Image (cartoon, rainbow, N blue to C red):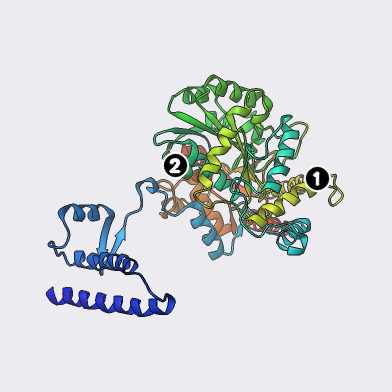
Amino acid sequence: MMKSFMLSIVTLTSFLGMIRTVSSFRHPSPSSSSLAAFGSRCVSISSLSIRNMNDASVLSNQQRKRSQMKMSSVSNGVAKTELASRLDGLDKPTVWHEFSPLAVKHQSINLGQGFPDWNPPQFAIDAMIDAVTPTKQRNANQYARSAAHLPLAQVLAEEYSAKWNRSIDPMTEVATAVGCTNALYCALQGLIDDGDEVILLEPAFDIYIAQVKMAGGIPKFIPLRTPQNDNDNNSDVKYNANDMFTLDFDELEHSISSPQTKVLLLNTPHNPTGKMFNMEEMKKIADIVQRNTHVTVISDEVYEHIVFDKEKSPHISIASLPGMYEHTLTLNSSGKTFSCTGWKVGWAVGPPHLTRAVTSVQQWVNFSAPTPNQDAIAMCLKKAWEPYEGHDSYYAYLASEYKRKRDILIQTLNIAGITPIVPDGGFFIMGDTSSITFPEKYREEVTDAMPTNPMPRDWAMSRWMTKEVGVTAIPPSAFYDTENIDLAQNLLRFAYCKGDDTILEAQRRFQFYFEQE
């Protein structure tokens, strides 16, 4: 042991000598204090190896106890550090880690993940080029203002002022972020204290649950219930997402009245169901919130422009309802709208006391969203209102294209005997798979990502469909708390934000498999 100790000292001395030599080339006269500071860090590294040799004379009992708390194991002299407790359960593989590689392995048509498989419109590409081209004098190649790149904030303020019939201040009521996901992260970090409760409407996008926990909050789940789940003999069910997935307002009020509840996270058009909350539902939610003013609504509206019947089923922002602006932080992004999910430009609009939650966190994390991306989106938002491809605007074209793709996927699901629960917005369809049987052996499989053991029916069915049919969907049990996973057992989520060839190939595979049965 003494030889090992002396070897460590000799190695350390040689290493410091080498650092002095290298430093002399970079700095004419390195200060003794800087070398001493570096030496102290090296001594810390050396002391770690000494600790691994169990030399009790080097570290005090208090130091050893602190080290033992942070070190889960030591193998071959390398200490493995435990993650922070707030990440408990969040480091395990997710549904995306399981099904994307599984689809690749089995050459399955992946209708799971929700991102377009085509490029942005040409005017968006041109806008990005202009944003970084010096001769265009956009001045967008350096840091943006932390709260928001002002050209984008001004465009957003104009749009939301017109939509909500109120004046929005671009300096204090608009915050931008690295996508809607980052805007939500900052908002929750800024609004939630340890132990605060956040209401999530299930099925809830899995990122919501993780971000609430990372902020120290406690997710509080209220399921959107379907007539099928409550009464399997109900033959009068309308297979429309707006009618199928309903919120129990008594249950919402009971949960929201708790003083520990600080946030209601709302999503419309809703992922993964495609439900769009109508005016009657929104008014009921608004009434409940205004009776419980300790609660803030965070409204995720990233699918706002992908709406198929603006007359019968329009998109409604809860912030636009009387008395709700002061209680609501509205989130949105450009990725879904302009088919540029990799650009990651999102924003939050609301009263200054709520947007400050986003800006106060962001300035200490990533400081600002990339300036060229923000600048390009500022130009895109203006261009999108102009006529496009025979439509009154790019937004009208976007909704028309997605409705057409939705209808192709509806036909595709019907071929497989999957009953589509038709959405009026977004780009996902939930399908009722209760009429389909598959080998029980798939329920007996065990994977790292599955939410419960035994494997939920929807999870097993998606694995079977990927392997044997050649089409991949996402099992919605990934979006439920374990207590409510049974609500997902007969459902699968399919994405139609895919090229026609992709959806039609899925249709061909369904025909080949199910018509031979």
- Label for residue 215? 2
Q: Earlier in the sequence, mark 1 or mark 2?
A: 2
Report the residue that reaches farthest toward the right: 390
Name the residue rendered at 39%, 36% in the picture. 194
**Residue 235 image position (x, y, % from top left):** 62, 29
Name the residue rendered at 55%, 25% in the picture. 248
Residue 490 visible (yes or no): no
Which quadrant of the view contains residue 317?
A: top right
Neighbour tally class for label 2: few under 14, some 14-19, many 20 plus, Cα within 10 Å:
many
Which quadrant of the view contains residue 77?
A: bottom left
Q: Amino acid at mark 2?
A: Ala
Q: Is residue 58 left or right of residue 380?
A: left
- Is 329 in front, or is 499? 329
- Label for residue 458? none
- Is 367 in front, or is 431? 367
Secondary structure at numbered mark 2: loop
**Residue 160 image position (x, y, % from top left):** 71, 36
Q: Is residue 71 left or right of residue 390?
A: left
Screen quadrant of the N terminus: bottom left
- Residue holding disc 1: 385
Vertical position of residue 102 compared to residue 492: above or below: below
Disc 1 to disc 2, how far (Cα)?
38 Å
**Residue 423 image position (x, y, % from top left):** 67, 39
Vertical position of residue 107 compared to residue 169: above or below: below
Q: Amino acid at mark 1?
A: Trp
Residue 459 visible (yes or no): yes
Vertical position of residue 56 compared to residue 432: above or below: below
Q: What is the count of numbered marks?
A: 2
- Is 201 in front, or is 126? 126
**Residue 387 image position (x, y, % from top left):** 85, 48
